[in-house]
Image (cartoon, grey):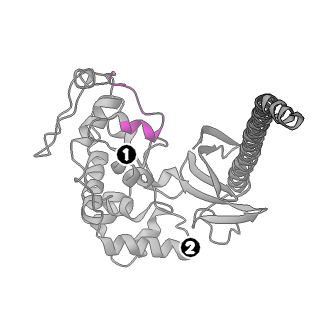
């Protein structure tokens, strides 16, 4: 009988022990889950903190390299200013800093700076297509039309440059609201005034004043970014209008006269590489130069411009990051001081 009782007691106690075992197991599992959840939460927080720290480090590194690249570009601009200030004639081939001859590159720590310098007097001044008196400057207009012809022949564009760009520029810079018509041009000879620009999706008024910068041409009808990139090295808004034959690009030289062909323009470019022209009369000795051509261009060219303007593009690079500065400089021949009249960080 005792044995039976013991067995009965054990049987009576068994459910309580089983319940206790289940309770302990449940609590242990719950603790494990909570611990795992906390571990996962801490892991996520650590990953997030690490990502943010790495992002901040990358941002700081980017800012440092970007600042370095900008400083390199500024250094290039200062080199150009020094060259213009300390050199009487930048076209002199003996000049060790002959920046006008080609793009110059200077190596620096973890990068470099490159400088491209162009003399604005070698370009066609679009602000002088119409004289202050209100009379059309036929010689400059004809030169602009010839330049358009040359560029259309030499370059592949989605659509050719239209002659209408010329009267549109004239209407943009003149002070009246009358639409310009070029009677000596057969097609596309009409300009536009404010009535055209005011009806655009984003309306604005015709400026009716001279251009302050060549990029303003993007506001003129018939001008596109592609066309401006093509014409930028040949057009200017500075100077008295006479073309400096010592630095004019070949297309500008060829556009000076309808009788000037590509071969003669190239001969002029090759001749000045040997020695800059000291006076206009030296052009007579260039092979292919005729009296008719000389007579046609002698009054609209120069070898020593009264006003000296330069466009500078300086690019700095540091570990793959690039910054570009575009500036217009002017040199006072009397004081030799150099002024920055236009500055843009690109």
**Which comes before the other along the chain, label 2 or label 1?**
1
Q: Quadrant of residue 38?
A: top right
Secondary structure mainly formed by the magenta segment: loop
Residue 215 magenta: yes
**Residue 300 visible in the picture:** no
| Relative image position of residue 131 (x, y in whole percent) | 34, 34
Bounds of the magenta segment: 205-218
Q: Residues within 10 Å of mark 1 (few under 14, many from 20)?
A: few
Q: Nearer the viewer, residue 345 or 195?
A: 345
| Res 322 label | none
Q: Residue furthest right?
A: 2
| Relative image position of residue 150 (x, y in whole percent) | 28, 61
Q: Nearer the viewer, residue 331 or 37?
A: 37
Q: Specify the quadrant that holds the C terminus.
A: top right
Element assignment for label 2: loop
275 w.r.t. 77: above or below:
below
Q: Quadrant of residue 338?
A: top right
| Res 225 label | 1
Which mark is in front, 2 or 1? 1
Q: Specify the quadrant that holds the N terminus.
A: top right
Count of numbered marks: 2
Q: Residue furthest front?
A: 1
Q: Quadrant of residue 274?
A: bottom right
Q: Residue furthest bottom?
A: 287
Q: Which residue is mark 2?
A: 275
Residue 134 magenta: no
Give the alpha-carbon distance from disc 2 to disc 1, as whole Å: 36 Å
Q: Nearer the viewer, residue 176 or 216?
A: 216
Q: Does the CB distance between marks 2 and 1 fall below 8 Å?
A: no
Element assignment for label 1: helix
| Relative image position of residue 126 (x, y in whole percent) | 37, 42
| Relative image position of residue 279 (x, y in whole percent) | 51, 63
């Amino acid at each position: 009988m005792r044995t039976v009782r013991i067995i009965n007691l054990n049987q009576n106690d068994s459910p309580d022990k089983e319940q206790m075992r289940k309770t302990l197991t449940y609590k242990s599992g719950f603790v494990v889950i909570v611990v795992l959840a906390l571990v996962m939460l801490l892991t996520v927080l650590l990953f997030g903190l690490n990502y943010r720290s790495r992002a901040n480090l990358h941002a700081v590194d980017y800012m440092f390299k970007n600042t370095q690249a900008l400083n390199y570009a500024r250094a290039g601009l200062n080199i150009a200013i020094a060259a213009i200030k300390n050199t009487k004639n930048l076209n002199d081939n003996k000049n060790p800093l002959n920046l006008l001859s080609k793009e110059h590159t200077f190596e620096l720590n973890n990068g470099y700076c490159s400088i491209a310098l162009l003399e604005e007097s070698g370009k066609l001044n679009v602000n002088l297509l119409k004289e202050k008196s209100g009379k059309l400057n036929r010689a400059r207009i004809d030169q602009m039309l010839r330049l358009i012809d040359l560029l259309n022949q030499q370059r592949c564009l989605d659509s050719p440059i239209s002659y209408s760009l010329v009267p549109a520029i004239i209407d943009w810079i003149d002070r009246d609201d009358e639409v310009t018509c070029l009677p000596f041009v057969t097609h596309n000879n009409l300009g536009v005034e404010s009535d055209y620009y005011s009806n655009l999706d984003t309306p604005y008024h015709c400026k009716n004043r001279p251009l302050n910068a060549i990029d303003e041409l993007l506001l003129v009808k018939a001008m596109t970014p592609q066309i401006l990139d093509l014409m930028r090295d040949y057009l200017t808004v500075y100077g008295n209008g006479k073309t400096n034959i010592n630095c004019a690009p070949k297309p500008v030289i060829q556009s000076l006269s309808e009788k000037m062909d590509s071969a003669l323009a190239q001969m002029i470019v090759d001749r000045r590489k040997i020695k800059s022209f000291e006076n206009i009369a030296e052009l007579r000795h260039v092979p292919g130069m005729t009296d008719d051509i000389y007579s046609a261009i002698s009054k609209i060219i120069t070898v020593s411009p009264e006003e000296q303007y330069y466009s500078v593009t300086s690019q700095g690079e540091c570990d793959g990051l690039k910054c570009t500065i575009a500036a217009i400089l002017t040199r006072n021949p009397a004081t030799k001081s150099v002024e920055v009249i236009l500055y843009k960080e690109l």
